[in-house]
Amino acid sequence: MPCGSIPFIIEAMAEKIDPITTVINADSQTLVTWSENYSVGIEHIDNQHKELVSLTNELYRACLAKNDTFEAVFKETMSRMVEYVRYHFKAEMELLEKSNFPDLQNHKMQHDQLIFDILEAVREYNEGKKFVPNNFVRTLKDWIFSHIAFYDQAYAPYVRDYLQSRE
Ligand SMILES: [Fe+2]
């Protein structure tokens, strides 16, 4: 599926995703909560996705804390996020290759695009261009968790079959 379809897919998924990812209330320090609806039925991938939930919430909390430490905390959390997203995507791609997942190239393209978008945002932030951290975290959250809820579900049966065949 071409990358151009992603906004449409996200829109189409919005109804399904909203109940999961909606901010609980205005005072909440939590932007996203883990739900079994996100599960791909592969324990170590689910654990990595849970780590993305907690990093996203950390970034969100960094944005809420509008104090002197904001910049340092935001930068440090962003760099851990980039590192973890890379680590997780690499782990996923290795599994997809071993499982002969037929849509592997498209999946890889989406991962590459997300990494590119994050690095672009980091660059803009570092260059002092107009950058609204709060908006960035919300967009990041939408992208990552739409991807998990929709595209990662597509590979799940292939990877589960592969892992079972090795038992
Ligand atoms: Fe993925």
Image (spheres, helix red, strand yellow):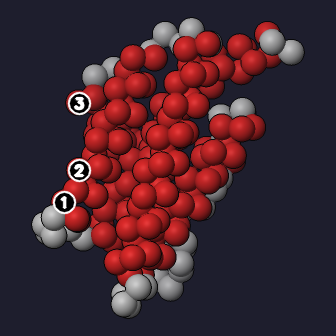
Measure how far apart labels 1 and 2 are at the Cα level: 6 Å
Q: Quadrant of the C terminus?
A: top right
Q: Is residue 116 placed above or below 122 in the rendered structure?
A: above
Measure how far apart labels 3 and 1 are at the Cα level: 23 Å
Compared across the picture, whether 117 is left or right of 33 comes to: left
Q: SS for tag 1?
A: helix
Q: Residue at x 33, y 71 (%)?
A: 134
Q: Residue at x 49, y 57 (%)?
A: 80
Q: Are marks 3 and 2 in contact (CB under 8 Å)?
A: no
Q: Read off the residue under disc 2.
A: 120
Q: Earlier in the sequence, mark 3 or mark 2?
A: 3
On the question of residue 25 being in view, the answer is no
Measure how far apart labels 3 and 2 are at the Cα level: 19 Å
Q: Residue furthest right?
A: 167
Q: Are marks 1 and 2 in contact (CB under 8 Å)?
A: yes
Callout 1 amino acid: Glu
Q: Residue at x 48, y 76 (%)?
A: 61
Q: Read off the residue under disc 1.
A: 124
Callout 2 amino acid: Glu
* Residue 90 picture location, percent across and down: 52, 31
Callout 3 amino acid: Gly
Q: Nearer the viewer, mark 3 or mark 1?
A: 1
Please tell me in which quadrant of the rendered image residue 132 appears. bottom left
Compared across the picture, whether 59 is left or right of 47 comes to: left
| Number of numbered discs on residues | 3
Nearer to me, 21 or 3: 3
Q: SS for tag 2?
A: helix
Q: Read off the residue under disc 3.
A: 4
Q: Earlier in the sequence, mark 3 or mark 1?
A: 3
User: Badge 2, how many Cα within 10 Å: few under 14, some, many 20+?
Assistant: few
Q: Residue at x 39, y 47 (%)?
A: 143
Q: SS for tag 3?
A: helix
